[in-house]
C-alpha cells in the first residue's frame, strides 16, 4: 500500500487552471430584413441552430436625422414558444434575472453594437419600444460569435438506418457542444455552472463524441479543489469571479465523483489523475457513512430537504435509490482502490457492500416483485433503476413490471439516462432504443435543436417553473443518447 | 467695399472642429447604503446637485455565492418628482427613448460597472427587479464622472443683498454649465443638441460667466457649415455621428444668427470671424424675404406649421412678433455690414427697415394701445415684446397694458428672456428684477438646482408633454438671469 497524501485545494485548482480550454469561435451572420421599424414594430431573427455566444447588431436610421435615442428590447429564445410569453407576466420561483432579455438605448445611429453578455439562443426578437416619429430603424446585420470548447468538427456523423436516430444523435451532440464552455456547464442559458452529477453524463458522452478529455480532467480537479474541510464535495461549483464550490452537498452527486473518475481512468488510462484524486473519492465515502443506519440501510436525515438528487421530483422517496447509487459508486471505488493500491480501503468497502446488499433484501417486496422505499414503502421507477445498477437484482422484467404497477414516474432526462443504463445492464437493447426513440425522439418531433432540461411527453410546452421563458432548452444531462447510440448501436 | 467670398461648408466645419472644447471632468462619489437589497427593493442616491456625465457602480453579493444574474433597473432623474412616474404609464408624444432608464443584468459579482451612456441627473434610483433568493445585492459605491466644457471655477460668486438673487444666479450658472458640452446643448437630458435661438441666449450668459468664447465661435461656425444650398441655416444641428444640420428651417432662429454674431463680435472684437460669417448673415436675410408680402408685412406661408418659433405656444399668432424679430436682427446686421464694409447691403437693409417700420403701423390698434397679430388681430405679450425690441414702440407701459388686457401669455423661459430684454430697453429695471424674482425665483422655491425648459407658476409639477418624466429640468434657454444680474444688477 502506498503512502497517501492528499493535495491541497490550491494545488488541485492550479492543475484545473492549467487545463483551461481553448474556446473555438465561429460567427454566424444574418442580413437585416428589408423593412425599417417604427415604434412598436419588431423583427425576429432565426439563426437556424442553437448558439452560445456574443451578439453584434449593425443599425442605422432612415428618414430624418435621428433626433432621439432608439430604445430596443431584445429577447433571446432557445425555442420560439418562449417568445409568446412575457417577462412581466412571469410569476414562478426561478429568478427572473435568468430570462434572456435586454433593454438597449442607442444614442447615435448608425451604430455597431456588441452586447457584452453571452446568450444561448436560436431566435432573437428585436422590438422597437421607443423611437421618434422623424426616423425609423433599419437593422443592417445581426450576428453571433458562437463559442464552445468542443472542436465542432470532431464527432464524425453517424448514419443509422433510422433517420430519427441520426437526428437524435445530431441534437444530442449539439446539446453537449453548446454546454462545453470553460467547464461542462449544465445549461448555457440558465445556471451555467458545473454540476457533479451532470459532469459524469457529459464526460461519458464526450468520450464518444468530442473527446475533449482534458476538459473532463479539468472539471474533476475543479471539484477536488473545492472540497469542504471534511473532504466532501459541493454539488456544483462556480468559476466566476473565482472558483468557488456551492455550499450544498448531495449524497448521490458527491459519490458519483468516483464513477466519473473511474470512467475517466478507463477511457484515458491516466493513472496519475486516478491516484491524485483517489483521496477525494475516499472522502466522499467517508461523508456518505453518516447517512447509514445501524441496519445498513439509508435513513433520510432529520429535516433534510435536498440531501440527495436522484430525480427532479419532490414526491420521490430517495432512500432505496440512494442505496443503489452508493453500491453503484462503490463498485467504481473498488476499481480505483486497486489502481491506487489501497488494499485496506478496498477490503473494508467490499465488506460493507456485501453487508448492505444483504440488508437491502428488506427493501424488496416479494409480492410485488419490486423494491420499495421509505416508511411509506413507495414504489418508484427510480428505486428499481438504482436497484438494478446497484446490483440488487438482475430481473430483466423489473422495470416493465414497475411501470405496469403504476410506479412513480421519471421526471428528468437525468434519471432517464440511468434508466437506459439499467436497461442495457439487463440486456434490453431494444427497449433502450425504444426509449431513445420515444423520449428524445419526442423532443425532436417537437422541434428540438438541442435537448431540454425537462421534457414531459404529455405536455411538451409545459414548464415546471411556471413559464417556458425560464426553461433551459439546451441542458447537458439530456445529451447521453449520443453515448448509447455511438457506444452500443453503431450497427443500427 | 471688400470682395466677398463665402467659405465652403467644409471650411467652416474645419474651423469648428479645431475649436472643439476640452471637457473638464470631476468625479462625485457616494458610498453605498448599509442595507443589502433583495428582489423588489430599491435605493435612491442623491448626488446633491445636477450632474451630466457617466456613472459607475460598484456591486457585490451577500449571502450564498450568487447563483443567478442580478437584474437592475436604474432610473436617473433631474427632479425627484420624475421618480413618482413610470415609463410604462407614459402616453405623451415625446419619444419614450428619452426617459433616462436602464435595465441591467449583471452576471458576475462583485462587479464594477461603467455605464456607457451619459446621463443628466441629480437622483439615481436603483431597483432590484430580479435576483435569486440565495443572495442579496450590496451597493458598495455609486459615482458619476461629470463633464462640462465650462471651467467650473470661472464665474466668481456674486453677493446680492437679496439671497434669492444669489440663488437664482447660482442656479442659472449651473444650468449653463451643465449645457456646455462639446457644443452649447439645449438640454443635457433631452434633445442634447445645438439650437440656433438657444445658442444666442447661452452665448450672452456665457460672456458674463464662464467666458468660453471659443465655444461660441465654434457653434457659430458649426451653423455656418450646415447651411443649405440656398445659404439658409437649420434650426438646430447634430454633431453625432457627424455634424449635420436638421432639415427644419425657422424664420426667427435663422435671423438670430445675425444677433448672435453681433454679440460675439462686440464681446470679443474678433473681426475675422465677423467677416467670415458675414455672408452667412446675409443669406438669412435673403431667405427671410420670402415671408414678406408686398405691403411690407409678414404673412404665414400657406400650410406652414413650424415656420417661426417665438414661443412654445401653438395658439400664438406669430406674424407681428416675426416682424419685430426681423427688425431686431436687422439692427444687428447693420452693425455687422459696417464691420464687413458692405455698404450696399447696409443701405438696402436700412431702407427696408424704414419701410417695414412704417408698414407696421397697420399692426397697431390705437384703441387698445397694443399691437395685434394676424387676421384674427390676436393680442399677445409676444407681439408687444417684439414690437419693443424691433423698435416699433417706446411706450414704457405697453407690457403692463397688454397684461391687463388679457393678452396671450408667455409659455417658455425663452420668451421670458426677451420680455426681460424688452423691459430693460424700456428702462424698467425694477420690473425686470421683479420678473426674475417671481419667475426664476419661483423655480428656486420649487427646489430647482438648474432652471427648467418650461415652468408654469400655476402648475410647477406639470408637463406639457404628458409626464414630467420627459421634461428637461436643465435647459439652457432658462439660464439668462445670470446675464441680466451680472450685467445690470451687480449693485443689488
Image: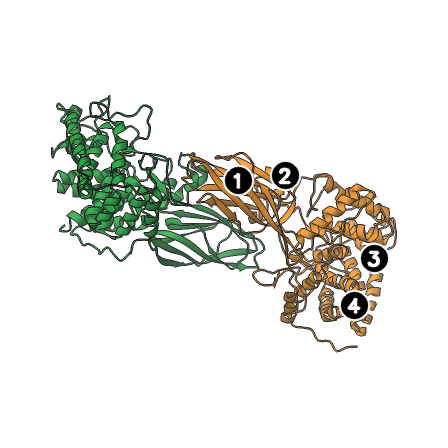
Chain colours: A orange, B green
Q: How many other residues sit within 10 Å of disc 3, few (<14), some (14-19) or many (≥20)?
A: few
Q: Which residue is mark 2?
A: A81
Q: Nearer the viewer, residue A214 or B348?
A: B348
Subunit ID for the residue under disc 2: A
The image quarter containing residue B428 is: top left
Q: Nearer the viewer, residue B479 or A287?
A: B479
- Compared across the picture, whether A186 is left or right of A488 comes to left
Callout 2 and callout 1 share a chain: yes
Query: Disc 1, disc 4: CB below 8 Å?
Result: no
**Mark 4 vs mark 3: in front:** 4
Total labels: the figure holds 4
Subunit ID for the residue under disc 1: A
The answer to which of marks 2 and 4 sits earlier in the sequence is 2
Residue A231: give x, y in percent of width and height.
Answer: 67, 68
Q: Which residue is mark 4?
A: A336
Distance Cα–Cα, label 2 vs label 4: 46 Å
Amino acid at each position: 500500500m502506498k503512502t497517501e497524501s492528499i493535495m491541497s485545494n490550491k494545488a488541485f485548482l492550479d492543475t484545473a487552471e492549467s487545463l483551461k480550454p481553448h474556446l473555438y469561435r465561429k460567427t454566424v451572420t444574418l442580413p437585416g430584413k428589408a423593412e425599417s421599424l417604427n415604434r412598436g414594430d419588431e423583427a425576429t431573427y432565426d439563426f437556424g441552430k442553437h448558439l452560445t455566444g456574443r451578439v453584434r447588431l449593425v443599425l442605422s436610421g432612415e428618414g430624418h436625422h435621428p433626433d432621439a435615442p432608439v430604445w430596443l428590447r431584445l429577447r433571446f429564445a432557445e425555442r420560439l414558444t418562449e417568445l409568446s410569453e412575457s417577462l412581466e407576466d412571469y410569476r414562478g420561483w426561478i429568478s427572473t434575472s435568468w430570462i434572456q432579455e435586454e433593454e438597449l438605448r442607442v444614442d447615435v445611429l448608425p451604430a455597431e453594437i456588441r452586447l457584452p453578455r453571452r446568450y444561448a439562443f436560436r431566435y432573437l426578437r428585436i422590438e422597437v419600444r421607443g423611437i421618434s416619429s422623424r426616423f425609423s430603424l433599419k437593422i443592417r446585420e445581426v450576428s453571433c460569435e458562437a463559442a464552445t470548447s468542443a472542436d465542432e468538427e470532431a464527432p464524425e456523423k453517424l448514419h443509422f438506418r433510422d433517420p430519427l436516430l441520426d437526428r437524435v444523435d445530431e441534437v444530442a451532440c449539439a446539446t453537449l457542444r453548446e454546454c462545453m464552455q470553460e467547464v461542462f456547464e449544465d445549461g448555457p442559458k440558465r445556471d451555467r455552472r458545473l454540476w457533479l452529477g451532470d459532469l459524469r453524463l457529459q464526460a461519458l458522452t464526450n468520450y464518444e463524441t468530442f473527446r475533449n478529455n482534458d476538459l473532463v480532467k479539468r472539471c474533476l480537479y475543479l471539484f477536488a479543489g473545492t472540497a469542504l474541510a471534511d473532504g466532501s464535495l459541493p454539488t456544483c461549483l462556480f468559476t466566476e469571479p473565482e472558483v468557488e464550490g456551492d455550499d450544498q452537498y448531495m449524497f448521490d452527486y458527491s459519490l458519483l465523483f468516483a464513477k466519473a473518475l473511474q470512467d475517466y481512468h478507463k477511457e484515458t488510462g491516466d493513472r496519475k489523475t486516478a491516484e491524485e484524486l483517489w483521496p477525494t473519492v475516499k472522502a466522499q465515502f467517508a461523508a456518505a457513512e453518516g447517512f447509514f443506519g445501524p441496519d445498513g440501510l439509508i435513513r433520510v436525515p432529520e429535516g433534510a430537504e435536498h440531501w440527495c438528487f436522484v430525480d427532479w421530483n419532490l414526491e420521490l422517496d430517495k432512500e432505496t435509490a440512494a442505496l443503489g447509487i452508493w453500491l453503484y459508486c462503490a463498485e467504481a471505488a473498488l476499481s480505483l482502490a486497486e489502481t491506487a493500491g489501497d488494499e485496506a480501503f478496498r477490503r473494508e468497502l467490499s465488506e460493507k457492500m456485501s453487508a448492505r446488499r444483504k440488508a437491502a433484501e428488506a427493501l424488496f417486496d416479494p409480492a410485488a416483485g419490486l423494491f420499495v422505499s421509505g416508511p411509506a414503502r413507495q414504489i418508484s421507477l427510480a428505486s428499481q433503476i438504482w436497484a438494478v445498477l446497484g446490483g440488487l437484482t438482475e430481473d430483466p422484467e423489473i422495470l416493465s413490471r414497475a411501470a405496469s404497477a403504476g410506479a412513480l414516474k421519471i421526471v428528468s432526462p437525468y434519471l432517464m439516462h440511468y434508466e437506459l443504463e439499467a436497461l442495457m445492464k439487463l440486456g434490453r437493447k431494444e427497449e433502450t432504443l425504444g426509449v431513445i426513440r420515444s423520449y428524445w425522439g419526442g423532443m425532436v418531433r417537437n422541434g428540438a435543436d438541442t435537448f431540454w432540461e425537462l421534457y414531459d411527453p404529455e405536455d411538451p410546452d409545459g414548464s415546471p417553473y411556471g413559464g417556458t421563458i425560464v426553461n433551459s432548452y439546451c441542458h447537458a444531462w439530456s445529451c447521453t443518447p449520443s453515448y448509447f447510440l455511438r457506444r452500443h448501436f453503431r450497427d443500427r
